[in-house]
Amino acid sequence: MEKLYRDLKVVFKGDITTDSHDRQSYSHDASIYQMRPDAILYPKTSLDIQNLVRFASKHKHIYPGLSLTARGAGTDMSGGAINSSFILDMTRYFGNVHSLSETQLHVQPGAYMRDIDPMLHEKGVMLGSVPASRDLCTVGGMVANNSGGEQSLRYGNTENFVQSLKVIFADGNEYTVEPLTKRQLDAKMRQNNFEGNLYRRIFTLIDENYELLHTARPKTNKNSMGYGLWSVWNKEEGIFDLTKLITGSQGTLGIVTDITFKVIPKAKHTGLMMVYLPDVKQLATVIQTVMRHKPSTFEGFDDITFELGIKYFKIFQKQLGTKEWLKQQLSLTTSVAKFKGHLPNIVLMVEFEGNTPVEIQTKIAELQYDLRRFKLRMEVAGDEQASAKFWKIRRASFTLLRQRVHDKYASPFIDDLAVQPQYLPEFLPELRKIIRKYDLPATIAGHFGDGNFHIIPLMNIKSSIDQAKLEPTMRDIVPLVLKYHGTLAGEHNDGMVRGPWLPAVFGDEVYQLFRQTKEIFDPLYIFNPHKKTDASWDFSMKHIRTSNR
Ligand SMILES: Cc1cc2nc3c(=O)[nH]c(=O)nc-3n(C[C@H](O)[C@H](O)[C@H](O)COP(=O)(O)OP(=O)(O)OC[C@H]3O[C@@H](n4cnc5c(N)ncnc54)[C@H](O)[C@@H]3O)c2cc1C
């Protein structure tokens, strides 16, 4: 190994650490897994990564375990951001925001969303797919996971905002990836080099299996499972867009070094209505009623999350500033006092956008009228300031579970199911039955309008009794999700947790197309092994975390 590092330092000019403490701190992301890397590398330039990829190819036959896993903030919930070989931390030197206009954001992948958000706000624009982890995550992670968020109900996942990417592929060269006309594609395919070969093989794979791929696409508003082959070739418009494949590929096809996003105007006015459900059984029908009113966002969280949010609202003091925090805290206390100790089972957040405050008020009034038959408590938070406290709790729902429930580990493994909302009245009771069957004390939050539920069981993840529940639960969940044409991952991707279930969800024929895709891009399995098509349940189970903290 010493020789390997000596040779590495000749070609790699960024920082390298093999310090035991550093390796330990990179051995986790937000998933239920752990893997200790050999080294953490901080590339300074694209050339560093290009050299590194060539280096990995050259040495792979001597060190078969050698691999490269890009990492942003490490908030991945599927095990996507951990590995045993080299981790490339993109946050130290790849965090520049190059430019922002009314229509476009040009940025490096290691930039934190929390640093970009104020710039977008100032320009009056937004990225419509920012996840609830917006205070933590990077844009590179969002692209690699095809992340979604509260606005995805209207605008879809990150794939809809990526205009072009720079990606370093397995030959060690950096390529621009962007939508191509058929003529441009033909020119690429005529090239007698790695890129030409890649375009030829991927185009043939997609074109020959066009119907099969379109049938296989989950029939949900959002999906981040599998490789998005079905979105690459738009035959009708004659556009071939490889960004649709790289987005959501979790760093298994190459390393993203540069991103151009489309940004869109932010709504002039918004208004939020809170709907409090005393019984989760009403959830499905209430969701359907709300959806008829076409809200711009429709989120929710359960009583456990709400209680933690109230109890630990102090954690938002730094983000909000003391003055604003005190105001929000007071307003939250006033809202909560009305429950007289009986918190609602589910809190729904329904937001409308409009050009005038009157337009918003009308939309809210219409919804209130329609919901009156359910006899629910409702509360209107007329503007962004009034709704801030609820957004803080919703966006921090997972963090609250992780940081404040000490004896159990918030375990994301059935955490991202999505079905079309029309199926919810049948789907949700069947889902609850499975959760009860395996005695999983699960919390629920998520993007209810998309039918995308974050169900997070609180488990003693290091105990073999709780670990033994994982596989049978998945075996019951997969057919349920398939019955309602859904997906196991609306936005959290496959990683180690869902990768092993790709054949069960998509069928062997489509799974083989995914595998071929991986091998066309990465024949030596240099990029992020053990994830997506390269995942195996046994391997994943051997890497379950050994602590609840
Ligand atoms: C509290 C909390 C709330 C969350 N809420 C949401 C939510 O609402 N919606 C949602 O979609 N997700 C959510 N997530 C999951 C996660 O935050 C998102 O997927 C986020 O976009 C990941 O960003 P990151 O910077 O942490 O990426 P990381 O975790 O570092 O990496 C994610 C994946 O991207 C790959 N990657 C990173 N950078 C690159 C690169 N430059 N090139 C190639 N591959 C790369 C990594 O290898 C890994 O596979 C949440 C997570 C937490 C902890």
Image (spheres, rainbow, N blue to C red):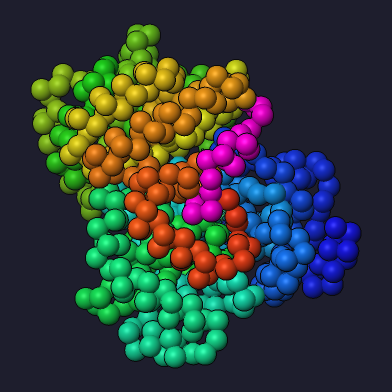
* Relative to 47, 129 lies left or right: left
Question: Which residue occupies 72% across, 48% down?
Answer: 37
Q: Eyeballing the image, is 161 above or below 115? A: below
Q: Is residue 463 magenta?
A: no
**The N terminus: image quadrant:** bottom right
Residue 50: x %, y % from top left: 67, 73
Hey, which quadrant is residue 291 in on the image?
A: top left
In the rendered image, is residue 142 in sight?
no
**Position of residue 283 in the picture relative to residue 123 (left or right):** left
Number of numbered tags placed on the structure image: 0
The residue sitting at 16% across, 42% down in the picture is: 293
Q: Nearer the viewer, residue 208 or 247?
A: 208
Residue at coordinates 82% horizontally, 51% vertically from top-left? 18
Quadrant of the rendered image containing residue 444: top left
Quadrant (top left/top right/bottom left/bottom right) for the C terminus: top right
Front one among 388 and 486:
486
- What span is in magenta? 531-549
Q: Residue at x 43, y 44 (%)?
A: 501
Q: Nearer the viewer, residue 388 or 394?
A: 394
The answer to whether residue 79 of the structure is visible from this angle is yes
Q: Position of residue 96 (x, y in %)?
A: 61, 65
Q: Residue furthest front?
A: 508
Point out residue 156 in the picture as x, y percentages from the top left corner.
33, 54
Question: Is 86 positioned to the left or the right of 298 in the image?
Answer: right
Q: Quadrant of residue 230?
A: bottom left
Q: Is residue 345 above or below residue 27?
A: above
- In the rendering, at what x and y percent does residue 83 appear? 65, 49
Magenta span contains residue 537: yes
Question: Position of 217 compared to 522: left or right?
Answer: left
